[in-house]
Amino acid sequence: WLSVANYSGGSLSLLPVLQNGSIGKIAAQVQHFGKGINTERQEKPHVHCVIFSKSGNYVAVTDLGIDQLFLYPIDKNKGVVNEQNAISTKVTAGAGPRHVVFHPTKKYVYLIEELTGSISVFKWVENKLTLVQNTIMIAASNLEGNTGADIHISDDGKFLYASVRGNINEIRIFKINKNGTLSAIGKQDTKGINPRNFTIAPSGKYLLVANQSSDNFVVFKRNKKTGLLTDINKT
């Protein structure tokens, strides 16, 4: 199955991936409704990110426009999205949920919020999302021109990385504690402007950043034991 976030339309789509690799017709579509308090960015629903849980039985959906995070159950045999049994939670009004990641081994979900530049940590137990921490990456005095962008977790589940973009262009580095909460341990300038997206290499030895506005792609060496990044002059 292929899940798609429709930002302008405020919906998510589920499509089958056929045996020859091509994409079939839409099997299911869920439409969101409403708006948020930010009249410029939240005038209607804006589904920004959709990802499958590790089991593939759920799809996590962030809606920047209505300040909500959803976990929709999926019937993988029929391609059905179960809207009636969705697990959902509201975030701080005006936060603007952007990207979301699942912890690889524990029942925690991590959400980066674009408009407030914050990270919310949720515990996922018994069909309920419970907020356990909200970490502010951008001081209120620096919110003008700065937003949160991308978020990823190392495969071993020990470290979380999040990008801040705008006037501040950094990868923020966090240790993931045993109780799922985050502790800030470092930051790395991205050597460019607007780190819209980044990824951790499959080996775990490198972190690669795409700086949209400066048109450069930067490789940093990653210490798998400490989680910290080192600039190796690869651009």
Image: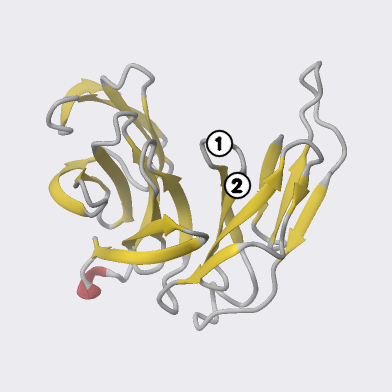
Label 2 near label 1: C-beta < 8 Å? Answer: yes
Q: From the viewer's perspective, is 111 left or right of 8?
A: left
Q: From the viewer's perspective, is 89 left or right of 32?
A: left
From the image, tell me which residue sits under label 1. 55
Using the image as rendered, state which of residue 66 and residue 218 is in the foreground: 66
**Crowding at label 2, few (<14), some or many (≥20) Cα neighbours within 10 Å?**
many
Q: Residue at x 33, y 46 (%)?
A: 193
**Residue 169, image x, y percentages:** 27, 49
Q: Which mark is residue 58?
A: 2
Using the image as rendered, state which of residue 25 and residue 187 is in the foreground: 25
Q: From the viewer's perspective, is 27 left or right of 169?
A: right
**Image quarter in which the N terminus is found:** top right
Q: From the viewer's perspective, is 25 left or right of 88?
A: right
- The image's colour scheme reads secondary structure
**Crowding at label 1, few (<14), some or many (≥20) Cα neighbours within 10 Å?**
few
Instruction: Report helix, strand or loop for mark 2.
Output: strand
**Residue 39, image x, y percentages:** 54, 82
Above or below, comparing residue 31 to residue 193 in the picture: below
Say which amino acid is labelled 2: Tyr
